[in-house]
Image (cartoon, helix red, strand yellow):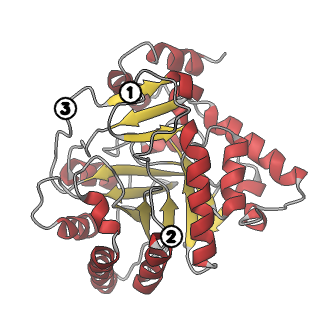
Amino acid sequence: MSPHDLAARALRALDPEDAHGWAIRGLKMGLGPRETGPDDPILAVKIAGLELPNCVGLAAGFDKNAEVPDPMLAAGFGFVEAGTVTPLAQAGNPRPRLFRLTEDRAVINRMGFNNGGLDPFVRRLKARQGKGGIVGANIGANKDASDRIEDYVTGLTRLWGLSDYFTANISSPNTPGLRALQTKAALEDLLGRVSEAREAMKVASGADYPIFLKVAPDLEDGEVEAIVEAVVDAGLDAIIVSNTTIARPASLKSVHAGESGGLSGAPLLEPSTQVLKRFHAAAAGRVALIGAGGIADGAGAYAKIRAGARAVQLYSALVYGGPGLVTRIKRELAARLRADGFAAVEDAVGAA
């Protein structure tokens, strides 16, 4: 067992939120793993104009304040999504608000978009300008905002030119009413105003950046199709499927299974992959998809790609798999692609 994996095991003895804080501190001190050598070329992929050295990304939530994107890129991720960041700093929900469901290889969180706000986020991204690696910004709305859609516009405009892509997060279950932005009329309003802001920033700066939408897995019949049409009409570049779920599978064994919040980790793999297949069918190649939810090994990543994802993201599995997990996932994924006769990730997208 590597020193980094031993450290991860030690962190699991702490309160989950305290452990995460110590992990961020350790990464800032340069104590994280470093992957040496180039990525296997079979894992390279292009999505929304972004050239990813590998298709395995770090999901939002791990690095809420853009403190450690470069250490996570060095650990082997093909792209890193920082945030969710809101215009103003907010404390989030009362603690405890993060729970390990160890028996289920799962996590429940009701963090509530706790973050330091745009000011320090902007400063940190400015400080890393010129460095390599794809770093995206996941933007959200303050809980008490009078106009939540304007908060997304603010995040986009303040971070324009500092982030390689943007994700509008409308799917957290921990900000009351936020998921209502996924309904047809509200989503069209949101995406229309975001698109207007994007066009204005393109004209002002002469540059354009991809915009993604992150959705929940808890969608009714017809909602998937409505979301896809709204995204296509607004000219967004990709949909991330999916965020955490409010569902509680009967298979959960942990004493924390009844905690409120969003469930992530192993139990989310199958339901989120099924929703991803629905998005793949509805999108019919018109918008790229990124698969998230429950990925803990190469098999999970491969299942997402075969279901229609061009790239994948993970976070919760790091709690149990340690920081060396991304290297193992990439190795296993490359082996599975080759075993099935694929020469590149693109060849396997939607193969299921």
Quadrant showing the N terminus: top right
Residue 220 left/right relative to 204: right
Q: Gap in Å between the C-alphas at discs 1 and 2?
A: 30 Å
Indicate left or right for 86 with 316 as reference: left
Q: Is residue 302 visible?
A: yes
Mark 2 falls on what kind of element?
A: strand
User: Of discs 3 and 2, which sits in the foreground?
Assistant: 3
Give the mark, 3 or 2, whose residue is nearer the N terminus: 3
Q: Is residue 89 above or below residue 164?
A: above
Which amino acid type is marked by label 1? Phe
Is residue 29 visible in the rendered structure shown here? Answer: no
- Residue 292 lies, with reference to residue 2, above or below; the image says below
Contact flag, marks 1 and 2 (Cβ < 8 Å): no
Which of the two marks, 1 or 2, is nearer to us in this view?
A: 1
Q: Which label belongs to residue 94?
A: 3
Residue at the image point whose x is 57% and y is 50% from the top: 271
Q: Which residue is mark 1?
A: 99
Tell me the crowding category of disc 2: few under 14, some 14 to 19, or many 20 or more residues within 10 angstroms, Cα based. Answer: many
Q: CA distance from mark 3 to mark 2?
A: 33 Å
Residue 71 numbered tag: none
Q: Which element type, helix, strand or loop, lies under badge 3?
A: loop
Q: Position of residue 251 (x, y in %)?
A: 56, 32
Residue 76 placement (x, y as % from top left): 60, 42
Say what amino acid the circle numbered 2 marks: Ala
**Residue beneath disc 2:** 238
The amino acid beneath tag 3 is Pro
| Tag 3 and tag 2, C-beta contact below 8 Å | no
Tell me the quarter of the picture where residue 285 sits: bottom right
Q: Is residue 347 above or below residue 332?
A: below
